[in-house]
Image (cartoon, rainbow, N blue to C red):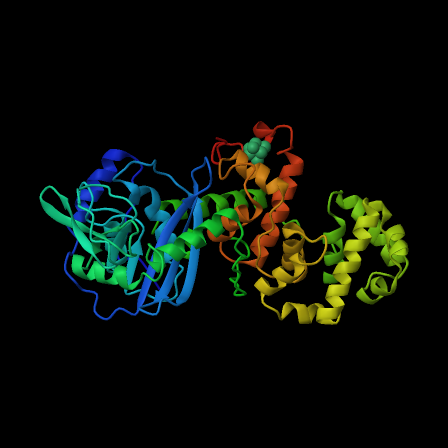
Amino acid sequence: MVEPVLKHRWPENYKDAVRLQERLRSRLVIEDRTGEVRIVAGADVSYDKGSDYYHAAVVALKFPEMETIEETHASGKARFPYIPGLLAFREGPIVIKALRKLKSRPDVLMIDGHGVAHPRGFGVASHIGVLTGIPSVGCAKTVLVGEFRGPGTKRGSTSPLIYKNIEVGRALRTKEKVKPVFVSAGHMISLDRACEIALGCCTKYRLPEPTRRAHILVNKVRRGTLTTGISASRIALTPCPSPEGRGVKETCHSERSEESALLNIYNSLLAHYGPQRWWPGETPFEVMVGAILTQNTSWTNVEKAISNLKRSDSLSAEAINAMPEARLAELIKPSGYFNIKATRLKSFIKYFIENYGGKIEKMRKRGPAQIRNELLSVTGIGPETADSIMLYALEMPVFVVDAYTKRIFSRHGFFPPDSDYHVVQRFFMDSLPEDVKLYNEYHALIVRLAKDRCIKKAGQCELCILGGGMHKVQ
Ligand code: SF4
């Protein structure tokens, strides 16, 4: 577990940031306190194109074997602009958020940035080290301050990085005839030891494995190509308490403000509209069928199709499996695209019977990540349908995202309107407590709000429960 040993509010302007940086510098320890190093964790950050929405990934590896033992990530919105020398104030909050999700405690943190090789001797690697109380190393691809002569061409060669006549870091050749990296001590480590560990983490690439793997991971997170990591643990939460009520400690301003904002919105919607009692289906099986039929049509049409299935005594996995596809298409005709949907429903039922004997209970015993991968491999099941089945039929803690979610929350400036499904999903799941009932009700309330006030053409903000200043539209 990486719980910060020092907490502060993240400043939002240049003057306050520099003042805090100078104050924190007095806590810096530039001597080796690493002891035996068994785990090194690397961190990296990536931004959505043209936006302040960003992601951090942390990868913990066994040292010196360089076997990955744990990966975490977090997403959010940067509150501080990019100013050279103040990177920690932009990226620190999201890195801390990802670090706090680690179950293991690293012996050394490796940050893609600088430690004391910095205009005020306190770069992002030093800042993260001081906040976490873990020895930290800055390992950057480029120089921020100082001058150096190229080190020898052999792997392991170094040359001093000099700033104001002091050696603040070293250029380290990690691979023969390849550009060096720039290593500096972050916190609780000497420069010699920092270089030794950085080199020990390099295999066949220029960059040390911890930051290299964190870089790969964070790009997957940003592109939404990472399978959503979903744990099956649950938190009882009815009704949704305020953040204070759950005893959330303030460790990171942006993390806290996102969580608070989302819970405030949820509580306002719940108080205004009341519980929506989703999903409208009598059995989990009916919910699964409804989730497939509701693609590109209104729920009223789905209800007619389901009534037809019920009337003909066909609303079961066995009956649909045995039925000719043309007959199924006829029964579900009111839901539109009935030929395509008949094929999709048949494919899903085949998967359901072949893998789980048509038994919901058997399906519920599988891990959410596996179920999601399986569902996504069934013809015609995309992320929204898969997640609807998982949340509403299988009661797994996964947040369902739809066009309404993107519309409402992008209008409030949480993310761009064209954000990727998984980016939006991660935003909610990283910011909200993991709770099936909360996810269930929240999604239903979003749909209600979108149909009631936040219509496609333009939101009726003056009449909307979220239009009263507390949730100001940007
Ligand atoms: S109608 Fe206006 S205030 Fe209401 S959710 Fe939409 S954008 Fe927000």
Q: Which residue is more in the foreground, 362 or 84?
A: 84
Quadrant of residue 239 within the rendered picture = bottom right
Give the quarter of the figure containing the N terminus: bottom left
Image quadrant, ligand 1 = top right
Q: On the picture, is 341 further left or further right than 39?
A: right
In the rendered image, residue 30, in percent from the top left (x then y), is placed at: 15, 56
In the rendered image, residue 398, in percent from the top left (x then y), is placed at: 58, 56
Q: Vertically, is 455 above or below 260?
A: above
Q: On the picture, is 192 further left or further right than 304?
A: left
In the rendered image, residue 344, in percent from the top left (x then y), is placed at: 77, 54
- Residue at point 74%, 60% (across, down): 348
- Residue at point 74%, 43% (across, down): 296
Q: On the picture, is 132 further left or further right than 453?
A: left
Q: Vertically, is 275 above or below 417?
A: below
- Residue at point 85%, 51% (across, down): 332
Q: Give the tally of numbered discs.
A: 0
Q: On the picture, is 330 further left or further right than 267?
A: right
Q: Which residue is more in the foreground, 362 or 344?
A: 344
Q: Which residue is more in the foreground, 74 or 251?
A: 74
In the rendered image, residue 271, in percent from the top left (x then y), is placed at: 57, 44
- Residue at point 39%, 45% (across, down): 254
Residue 359 visible in image? no
Quadrant of residue 2 within the rendered picture = bottom left
Residue 204 visible in image? yes
Q: Which residue is more in the foreground, 213 or 417?
A: 213
